[in-house]
């Protein structure tokens, strides 16, 4: 159907206020991706840090496997995808054993062109707490945190808790761009059921990988001033 110019403009005029309202609404809630945030700069290696391990079981789920196992499984999936895409990957643990926070950070600190991505699942006394959040500390990690966060929230349509600056040890002691991702609350019955599924964890790994690859592509294609 071809609309007359008159009809088109008349109706565009009518819907404009709604379009601008929609734009405000969408920009306010759709994505936590910060376009102006500082980037990581050049990196060839991704250090993947599966939280906890060994006697440190991490958070206890409502039912199913503990945080340490969920984190390791997701990290292993993430490592596989990144390697398939040509990145060098180093994991701070590849099995169920304890690694100190100092030893985790030491891995990225001795690798010059690396970034550090720590994988965790969340827990709260408030049983209805839910959603995904990403932490960073150094401003050079803000854009990576923002990319990962906005990709992850789409992977199982969880609540977007946003990106937050926190002085966690693995962020504070890191010489490299570093983020800590909380992939969902295993203290929440509904959310735990979702992340206990390996399909969900694969989607989460896919989304984190695509964010990391986008950050790297951004560096490779951006003018020097914008890295
Ligand atoms: Zn944890």
Image (cartoon, rainbow, N blue to C red):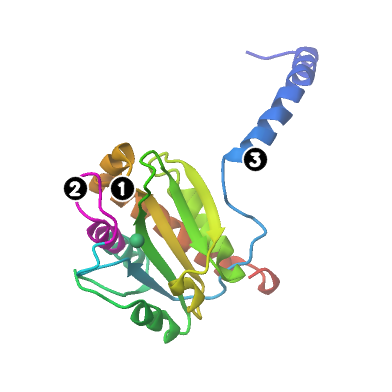
Q: Earlier in the sequence, mark 2 or mark 3?
A: 3
Residues at marks 2 and 1 touching, judged by CB atoms closer than 8 Å: yes
Disc 2 from disc 1: Cα separation: 9 Å
Residue 107 in view, yes or no: yes
Q: Secondary structure at mark 1?
A: loop
Residue drawn at x 64%, y 40% as measured from the top left? 28
Closer to the observer: label 1 or label 3?
A: 1
Q: Determine whether 1 is above or below 182 in the image.
A: above
Q: Determine whether 197 is above or below 89 in the image.
A: above
**Where's residue 171, x and y in %?**
48, 72
Which stretch appears magenta? 58-75
What residue would you read off at disc 2? 64
Q: Earlier in the sequence, mark 1 or mark 3?
A: 3
What residue would you read off at disc 1? 186
Between 179 and 185, which is closer to the camera in this rendering?
185
What residue would you read off at disc 3? 27
Label 2 beta carbon less than 8 Å to ligand 1: no
């Amino acid at each position: 159907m071809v609309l007359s110019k008159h009809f088109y403009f008349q109706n565009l005029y009518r819907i404009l206020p709604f379009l601008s309202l929609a734009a405000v609404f969408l920009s306010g809630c759709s994505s936590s991706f910060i376009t102006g945030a500082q980037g990581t700069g050049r990196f060839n290696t991704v250090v993947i840090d599966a939280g906890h391990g060994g006697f440190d079981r991490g958070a206890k789920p409502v039912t199913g496997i503990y945080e340490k196992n969920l984190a390791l499984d997701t990290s292993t999936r993430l490592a596989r995808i990144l390697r398939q895409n040509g990145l060098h990957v180093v994991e701070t643990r590849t099995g169920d054993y304890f690694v100190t926070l100092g030893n985790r950070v030491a891995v990225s600190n001795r690798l010059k062109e690396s970034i550090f991505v720590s994988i965790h699942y969340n827990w709260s006394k408030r049983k209805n707490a839910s959603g995904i959040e990403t932490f960073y500390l150094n401003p050079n990690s803000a854009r990576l945190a923002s990319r990962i966060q906005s990709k992850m929230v789409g992977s199982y349509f969880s609540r977007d808790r946003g990106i937050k600056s926190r002085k966690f040890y693995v962020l504070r002691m890191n010489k490299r761009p570093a983020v800590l991702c909380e992939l969902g609350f295993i203290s929440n019955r509904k959310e735990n059921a979702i992340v206990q599924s390996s399909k969900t964890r694969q989607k989460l790994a896919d989304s984190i990988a695509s964010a990391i690859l986008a950050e790297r592509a951004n560096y490779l294609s951006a003018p020097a001033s914008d890295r």
